[in-house]
Amino acid sequence: MSVHRIGFTELSGSQGARDGPFRVNIIFVHGLRGHPQHTWEDSRDRGGVNRGNKDAGTATPRKRDILAALLKSKPSSSASTSTTTPIADNVTSEERPNKLFWPDEYLTQDIPEARVWTYGYNADAIGGLFEANNKNSVSQHGQDFAVRVEREIGNQDPIIFVAHSLGGVIVKDGIRRSYTCRARTKLVIFLGTPHRGSTYTGWGDIASNLALLALQDSNKKIVKALEVNSEVLDNIHEEFKTIADKSRIQIHSFQEARGISGVKGIHSKVVDDFSSRLDLPRSLETVESIDANHIQMARCGDRIDPQYRAIVGVLQQFIRRMVLDGNGTGLQEMPAMASGVEASVVETGGGMDRALTNRTARPCHYIPLPENRRFVGRDKMLDTLKEMLFVRKEWRKAAIVGLGGIGKTQIALQLAYWTKKNRPEFSIFWVPALSKATFEQAFTTMARELPIQSGSKDDDVKESLRRYLSSGAAGPWLLVVDNADDGDVLFGSADMPGGISEYLPESDDGITLFTTRSREVAVSATGSDVIELHAMDPLEAADYLEKLLIGGSKTGAAELLKELSYLPLAITQAAAYLNTIRVPIAEYLRLLRGADREAASLMSREFYDGTRYRGSQNAVAATWLVSFDQIRKSDGAAADLLAFLSCIEPKEIPQSILPRFELEEQMVHAVGTLCGYAFLTRRGDSRVFDMHSLVHLATRIWVQREGLTATTDEKATRHLAAVFPSDDYTNRNVWREYLPHAFRVLQYSKELDIEEKSDLLFWMGRCLRMDGRIKEAIKSLEEACQWRNRHFAEDHPSRLASQHALAGAYQANGQVKEAVVLLEQVVAIRKQVLAEDHPNRLASQHALAGAYQANGQVKEAVVLLEQVVAIHKQVLAEDHPNRLASQHALAGAYQANGQVKEAV
């Protein structure tokens, strides 16, 4: 297509003229010695700055072409009709094989809702192939630009500018001169623009010398304007900053990550990082680097080029937001955009390297709970959250606080799914804060969905995820921290230091929403950004109950709702009972009012602050206790299952961990009964369930009321010990599902003194060590050892096995001396009771040798390993893994001992 050298050209794309519908104008403006087409072109078959060409930042290979072009040049008769190509923004060539003009061929297709324009002006600061016939100052260029925008961009759609180098200064000057430009401009993308002066004059010196050789002239005004701290640029810079702030114009400043080498006078970047940013607040300006030099950052030869992915990603993200707000309405309230390029975060020994990938950032949604299709009311609360979090953006952290069962989780869930539908650029994460175990489990799951890599298996995934979400690479996100009721879990305590708040991310692009029963926790987490949630009003509650009930008479509904204190959770459970049992509302009310007042009072007190609820929750307690008693009468298996559930974590309950019944049909029916009462909720079609934390608390009170606490806890401990997997790597997913529940069982079984408890602790410790959770492994294994040391003889296999495992955990934790002491005891005893070729005896000797070597006792390690290797040679095939492992270890010990020849 034909591109005007001076003025505007609308690009039609490779398919010819386009019909729209259009929503926005995107205008490209070139830089010094640039061209409205050639500045944005590159070879289609170029190796690419980020596709293997490691020398793309070096200008030396082109210096011969630059000089040749100048020596062959002839003055052009018309600057306005020239189609020559800028090779380095200050030199042109008439040969242009196989070039790709990406704004025309790619952008018009990838953003079909945009009119794409390119703008040209005579920016020939030095001679070359053109006469120096345009001696306009930067200000004159800006004035011409503003006039042409007003005259030639005749539609009423918003404007986005993409400006390279000096073109950014022209754009800023045009905006400050024209109210129309100012009002229509919504976003400016700067590519290496010198806002506050630049070392670009180094290029001017080189060009001037070549121009003198060719008897050419220079446009001194433009070159002078690029000097550091020039008066012209300073004035434009300060005035534009004021306008951008007042008009809420969004800025995305791309900086060149590579310098130009091989050219005298330029030693690094053409425009340094200080000069290429406006220093506006982060709510207005996003600063990002492109892994290219000053020339190549505007050129793209393929859609996979990182610079294309970055620029188009920013444009697409902004336009999506613009469409959501009604074709430009409300854009002034938008936050600064995250990068359109996804960044890989690579953990390397505690540090974090960020590298641009070739993929546009895609939002990630981790919401483990399904959307509540029966949600009604709460409009005022949701509108307040949307206003403060997404429109006015006054809150980056907020908390919903209220009594248990009030509906905090459901409101947060509704907001999460609203965000997913209406703010598609946002990633959404949901973390239960019931305990450190559930928090870690959620963070581990989230990390698998994000571009995070750990340097080793012992790296802390929580810290890696925190750093990633705190970086600009993550883009905008909403994090819901649900059930943050326990201040000790969230912030830590003297007995339990290191709360989960240490791992919560901080980012200008991130929003964190807490739900909690504790106002103290809410204020500590968010300051004054707290919303207190009260019960539903009578009309909302009536609508909710009507939506839940399956037919039947509604007589007595108002009285029932009042008895339930209009609490959503209590209404849900009551409706489940009425739908399942099919009794009249009046009968349910009779049972409710006749419940055990003492138990209901206890439940109410503990509802108040997470440890001692009191107040208006009597009806909630009565509802649950009535339902529990009814389940026990109608479904004994479901009651047994409910008792077991009272001992484990209420979230992410795998069906495989539940006790088995004689018939599979009993299990299906029992689970169905609990789901029918909404005490259990199945996650979609999976075999994973959740229980509301307050329902879980009620089950504990119910078991206590029945005098079954000790029996129930013992049964649960024995069952967990029987089903908990070994530390075989193939069981890794299973033990990760079971660990939070095992921790909860042990919490309730502190006074229990049975062998199965030590067995559970033993396998938990070994699995924790496999997961790199060494300190937790040591704690479990020490407790297992203490029990077995008290109850078993010193040569008992279980006692020796736990000591062996604990020694391994000690060594992994750097407690080498403690490991040596334990293993010496184990080896000494096994020498007395086991044959010299017994696998357990050899394994303990091998482990002791490793501890010796770690402790600097290399000679002792060599002696032990020589014995192990000799015996393995007698009893194992030469390709047996254990034999090869001992030989490998001996070679390492030889080398550490200076016996290199023996090692070889």
Image: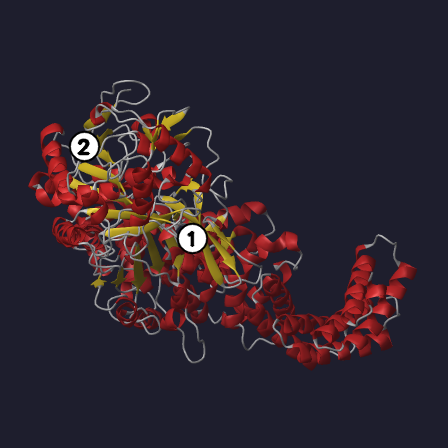
- Verify CB contact (< 8 Å) between mark 2 and mark 1: no
User: Which residue occupies 25% across, 18% down?
Assistant: 17
Q: Residues within 10 Å of mark 1 (few under 14, many from 20)?
A: many
Residue 372 appears anywhere in the view: no
- Asked whether, in this view, residue 244 is left or right of residue 705, the answer is left
Q: Nearer the viewer, residue 291 or 222?
A: 222
Work out whether 680 lies above or below 684: below
Residue type at mark 2?
Asn
The residue sitting at the left extreme is 179
- Asked whether, in this view, residue 15 is left or right of residue 222, the answer is right
Which of disc 1 and disc 2 is earlier in sequence?
Answer: 2
Which residue is labeled 1 in the image? 680
- Residue 367 position within the rendered picture, expressed as x and y whole percent measured from the top left: 38, 49
Q: Nearer the viewer, residue 577 or 203?
A: 203
Per the model, the C-alpha gap separating discs 2 and 1 is 80 Å
Q: Quadrant of the N terminus?
A: top left
Q: Secondary structure at mark 1?
A: loop
- Residue 544 position within the rendered picture, expressed as x and y whole percent measured from the top left: 24, 48
Image disc number at residue 133: 2
- Residue 119 position within the rendered picture, expressed as x and y whole percent measured from the top left: 21, 32
Quarter location, residue 513: bottom left
User: Which residue occupies 7% across, 42% down?
Assistant: 179
Work out whether 93 lies above or below 569: above
Residue type at mark 1?
Leu
Q: Residues within 10 Å of mark 2 (few under 14, many from 20)?
A: some
Q: Secondary structure at mark 2?
A: loop
Image disc number at residue 397: none
- Residue 900 position within the rendered picture, expressed as x and y whole percent measured from the top left: 81, 66
